[in-house]
Amino acid sequence: MKKVTSVFWITLAITLSLSLWGSIAPESFESISGTIMGYISVHFGWYYLLIVTIILVFCLYLIISPFGKIKLGRPDDKPEFSYPSWFAMLFSAGLGIGLVFYGVASPLSHYIKTPPTAEPGTTEALEDALRVTFFHYGIHAWAIYAIIALILAYFMFRHGKRGLISATLEPLFGNHMNRGWGKTVDILAVFATIIGVATTLGFGATQINGGLTYLLGIENSFWVQLIIIFVVTILFMLSTYTGLSKGIKYLSNVNMVLAVLLFAITLILGPTQYILNSLTETIGSYIQSLPTESLRLAPNDAEERQWVLDWTVFFWAWWIAWSPFVGIFIARISRGRTIREFLLGVLLVPSVISFLWFAAFGISGIEAQNNGIDIASLPDEQALFGLFGNFPFGVILSIVGMLLIGTFFITSADSATFVLAMQTTNGSLSPATSVKFVWGFIQSATAAVLLYSGGLQALQNALIVAALPFSFIMVLMVYSFYKALLKERKKEAKPS
């Protein structure tokens, strides 16, 4: 522990203080966090939509610009991981539990309960349901992850900077990033990571509990979820002990195998032709609606505006809160790839996988609902198991589903402990196992406190609150990165 920095101790103190507050006065914690969340959603909704759209446009510009040829590392650096392992790790870290949790629930909810504009249960609502789900999990989300990862990888591997968020701002602020301001930036990044990961771990625990409730009648309660968090914490600690190239790599590959297995079975047992037709049409409508959907805020329609705040703004805040963790992790595994190769891989491959997943599970859930199987009445965490209950060998599929949630849970937590340890040991690419263990315990404890203080609503409140301050840092990072790229191009253009 002697190698940790002040960022470790300050962030640890802040997190423990908030956790203590949530434990002692859960109602107060939920009420205040909810008030702040409501204020941010209402007054900063336009801001979230603008910055996420600008980031996506910037990523697309880098792909087609001459900057795309720049390598994330030295000219002779080769990628450390093969394409399959690279895709598996970034996908497991970036979207795993979210896809399993919302694969059935999100499209079905937008069809039956919360369509953006159409009447619930109509053909228009069905078409909108899959399209807005694609929108929330598509290239906008991955642009947020990609830009943070790209900037970190560029400065770490091409310029030899420390693996810290603050180090990416040195072109703007110079040596100030080595002092108090730099520490503040890193503290915000670490705190956003803790809340983002704790939120997703909370979702994972509630869904495993939901599966146990659906299959075995086990009570759906905080105490069952606490036991689940405890068991999974032990498992991901074991994975953490084995290191990046073994534990996370192997588990990520297992995740992909299990995910492909469940996807293939759902595609075959579900309405296959309808799924493929819907997938094809929705990709077209998704691409066509991207410009208007990206900036839709409906200032003259209170109901539609509230939908955007509840869904799109929430998802953008979720991705931003997760971006320090996912970005740092993806950067760490991406040395040796060009900017163009990196962005095409990170933007397109996970997005396409998400589209395939939501088409298969979402359309299967909607079709089952229309055929009289009331999945929509189930809690979100049980929707997946309600769908499997309609399939042959449904119990086995549900067990495999819970296993997938568990392995995603483990890889997300394992990856996060690495990133948190890296950020609090001055950017070390090989942080001490003891530091990773401390952060593993803290993030699990934070997830438990958030669940105790208000369940999923407290998780969502904390997420949006934590995302706002880091979003300002993201904007500065993009400007700093572009300034460094221009300087590099100018240097290369000079005659030797």
Image (cartoon, rainbow, N blue to C red):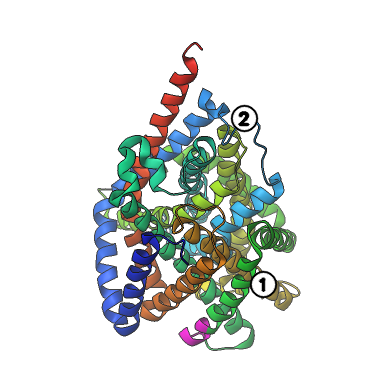
- Give the residue drawn at x 56%, y 40%: 284
The CA distance from mark 1 to mark 2 is: 41 Å
The boundaries of the magenta stretch are 220-226
- Residue at the extreme top: 495
Residue 299 vs 95, above or below: the answer is above
Label 2 SS:
loop
Residue at the outermost front position = 2
Give the side of residue 142 with respect to residue 252, left or right. left
Q: Is residue 226 visible?
A: yes
Crowd rating for badge 2 (residues with CA inside 10 Å; few <14, some 14–19, many 20+): few
Q: Identify the disc placed on residue 75.
A: 2
User: What type of secondary structure mainly makes up the magenta span?
Assistant: helix
Q: Check whether the beta carbons of the residues at disc 1 and disc 2 lie within 8 A of each other.
A: no
Label placed on residue 440: none
Q: Quadrant of residue 233?
A: bottom right
Can you identify the residue that label 1 sits on?
403
Q: Look at label 1 and name its amino acid.
A: Leu
For the residue pair 149 and 101, the one nearer the viewer reads as 149
